[in-house]
Amino acid sequence: MVTIQKKNCGDTSAYGEERWNYAFWRQSTTHIINPHESNNEGMENLFQWYIANGIVNIGYEDFDNAYDENMRYIGKGPIGYYELLTLVSYVARQLQIEGFVSKRYGHIPIIIHGLEYCWYVEEATAQANPNGEADVFLEAVKRNFI
């Protein structure tokens, strides 16, 4: 495990940006849901799920209600994003609770990423890891590693 960590993260600290910012990680170019591809089954399934759950105006954001009186962001991202994060978080949580992740990969966190680590992405990651698997990551975010 230490060899893998050094290979991927160098000598960064447990709270270092190189360890937790996915921009530093080796990237995969495999698309599961590709909005630029016609007849994409994953995209069609996603939009069917949105429709089945009454989510309309997908991708738009209500900017009038996205900030508090001190101009801190309190919104939930584009319409449909928070709902999808909630579902992903629930599925990840079940994988952790049922022991699928630990049996297959060891005691590792499931980290839910966004372009920024806003409150609802942190919340989704915390919910996805009920046994504290993501505690170091969440502390790193609190310390503003990015």
Image (tube, helix red, strand yellow):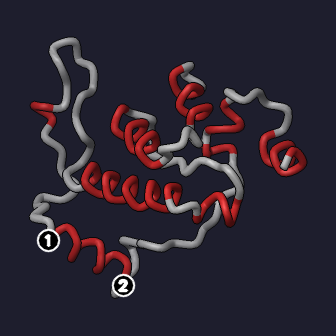
Determine whether 111 is above or below 34 in the image: above
Q: Is residue 57 left or right of residue 108?
A: left
Q: Residues within 10 Å of mark 1 (few under 14, many from 20)?
A: few
Q: Are marks 2 and 1 in contact (CB under 8 Å)?
A: no
Q: Position of residue 76 (x, y in %)?
A: 24, 40
- Quarter that holds the C terminus: top right
Q: Amino acid at mark 1?
A: Ile
Q: Who is closer to the viewer here, 96 or 50?
A: 96
Q: CA distance from mark 2 to mark 1?
A: 15 Å
Determine whether 86 is above or below 62 in the image: below
Determine whether 62 is above or below 108 in the image: above
Secondary element at image label 1? helix
Q: Position of residue 120 (x, y in %)?
A: 34, 38
Q: Residue shown at 55%/38% (left/top)?
A: 132
Q: Residue shown at 37%/56% (left/top)?
A: 90
Q: Position of residue 28 (x, y in %)?
A: 64, 65
Q: Which residue position is annotated with label 1?
A: 51
Q: Amino acid at mark 2?
A: Glu
Q: Is residue 129 left or right of residue 21?
A: left
Q: Which residue position is annotated with label 2?
A: 41
**Which is nearer the N-term, disc 2 or disc 1?**
2
Q: Residue shown at 56%/19% (left/top)?
A: 143
Q: Is residue 10 left or right of residue 76?
A: right
Q: Who is closer to the viewer here, 128 or 146?
A: 128
Q: How many marks?
A: 2
Residue farthest to the front, as pictured: 98
